[in-house]
Amino acid sequence: MKEQYKHLLNFVANLITLGFHGVMFAIVWYNYYANWVSENPIVPFFRRGNWAIIGLYVLIVFFFTKVLGGYRVGYVRVGDIILSCVLALVMANVVAYFELCLVWRDYVDAIPLADVAGIEICFSILWNLIVRKVYKSMYPPRQMILVYGDYSPSDLIAKINGRRDKYNICATISYRELGFVEICKEIQKFQAVVLNDLPGEVRNDLLKFCYERGIRVYCTPKISDIMFRAADDIHLFDTPLYLFRNQGLTIDQRFVKRIMDIVISLVGIVIASPFMLLIALCIKLYDRGPVFYTQERLTRDGKIFKILKFRSMKVAKPDDEAHITMKDDDRVTPIGKIIRNIHFDELPQLFNILIGEMSFVGPRPEWKMTTDQYTESVPEFKFRLKVKAGLTGYAQVFGKYNTTPYDKVKLDLTYIENYSVWLDIKIILLTIKILFQKENTEGIDSNQTTALK
């Protein structure tokens, strides 16, 4: 029965948080900003005007918190929840300040709003810790069994075991070791089942078995599954049809995306120019080597272009073998470690975006050599080339630097097949969040030259 109240607990906890933010802003609004008088006073707000200002603030906080995943209590790590809430409040209060300036047609004192933001942040941290503790006590880790196919599920188990607060894989079974009837008997002993890399027929039979009995199922998707999720429903007659367009972005989508790229890159270059000048100076003073690093990469339809980055490694010798960055790579300079950790080595790519070689959001561009190597192992890897390469992307937000090629294809294909302007905006905002998450920049192991395992 407790399972039925899980979403209710999450809803009530988030409603209390949002209500607190609204009350705090109302206090600072009524006690300071509503009575603020500029040199050219305007007509005071009526009651409904006050409510509108407060309501708009609540909506802004809700928007940023929702996009950054701050309401997913019990789903993601408590540290991620707190980071999302803190960033959302910072962004919301920055927007709220400019809103106040527009309301009063003048610059207003930001100190009262900053004080309230500090109180809201402290409350959010404390409240999320309390809610997470309650959630954990009410809903302990789910006891699970993993059914796998021909390949070892060790990598998936390692990832799932990273969330022992939520999942607990107690047993594993290969579908080749036991028959369907025996597997079904084992499944019923657990609270949930994970289906990993199973042939379609076996997976479908197990899904139907679990559906009939209300058993929770987690399933790793195949590339075709991602295509199915994005297909259009056709209801012209009494037999349902799925339509797969398989063309990447439409002409109108590419036009809107290009306009966004031009605007964002121009604004980004203006804002980032002081940082770029400082980084360039530091790199030059460190070893007198070149400031920039160019490399041939692939973009839409396999077109080759030269990506522009700040040099973060030692100057390569002619006989050095090229390979992607490893964990604790000794080629990375002290300056490089800093700019790589905060992703500022990527800032020059704003110029690649401005001239149309890249997009702001899209699959990260790979070397041609690496793409050819990955394609030999994962033929679908070339599907990523249906759209322009991007500065950030779905795989960067939800994956890691060392994500395997097969998983990277699935992430990037999810973006391509579900593209929208809203998705681009969401990924851009989530990119700000991952700047504070070091694990997203983790390199490959020392015994690897690519992300293939």
Image: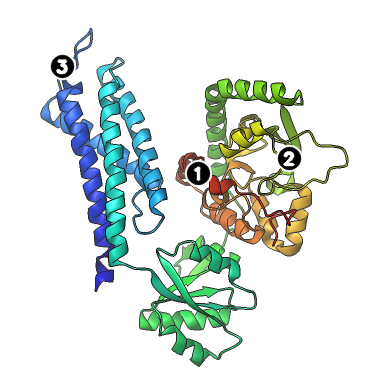
Q: Is residue 258 above or below residue 39?
A: below
Amino acid type, callout 3: Val
Residue 435 spot, x, y in % from top left:
51, 40
Labels 2, 1: front one: 2
Q: Is residue 232 above or below residue 399?
A: below
Amino acid type, callout 2: Arg
Labels 3, 1: front one: 1
Q: Residues within 10 Å of mark 2 (few under 14, many from 20)?
A: some
Q: Residues within 10 Å of mark 3 (few under 14, many from 20)?
A: few
Amino acid type, callout 1: Ile
* Pointer 2 or 3: first along the chain: 3
- Secondary structure at numbered mark 2: loop
- Spatial CA distance of label 2 from label 1 is 24 Å
Residue at the far top in the pictured view: 39
Which residue is under mark 3? 43
Residue at the far left in the pictured view: 47
Q: Is residue 204 left or right of residue 316?
A: left
Q: Looking at the rendering, in which quadrant would you find the N terminus?
A: bottom left
Which residue is under mark 2? 331
- Spatial CA distance of label 2 from label 3 is 63 Å
Residue 351 spot, x, y in % from top left:
64, 29
Q: Is residue 371 above or below residue 210?
A: above
* Pointer 2 or 1: first along the chain: 2
The residue positioned 36% from the left and 54% from the top of the image is: 72
Q: Is residue 349 visible?
A: no
Residue 346 spot, x, y in % from top left:
62, 35
Depth check: 228 or 174 in front? Answer: 174
Q: Is residue 265 above or below residue 184?
A: above
* Pointer 3 or 1: first along the chain: 3
Which residue is under mark 1? 434
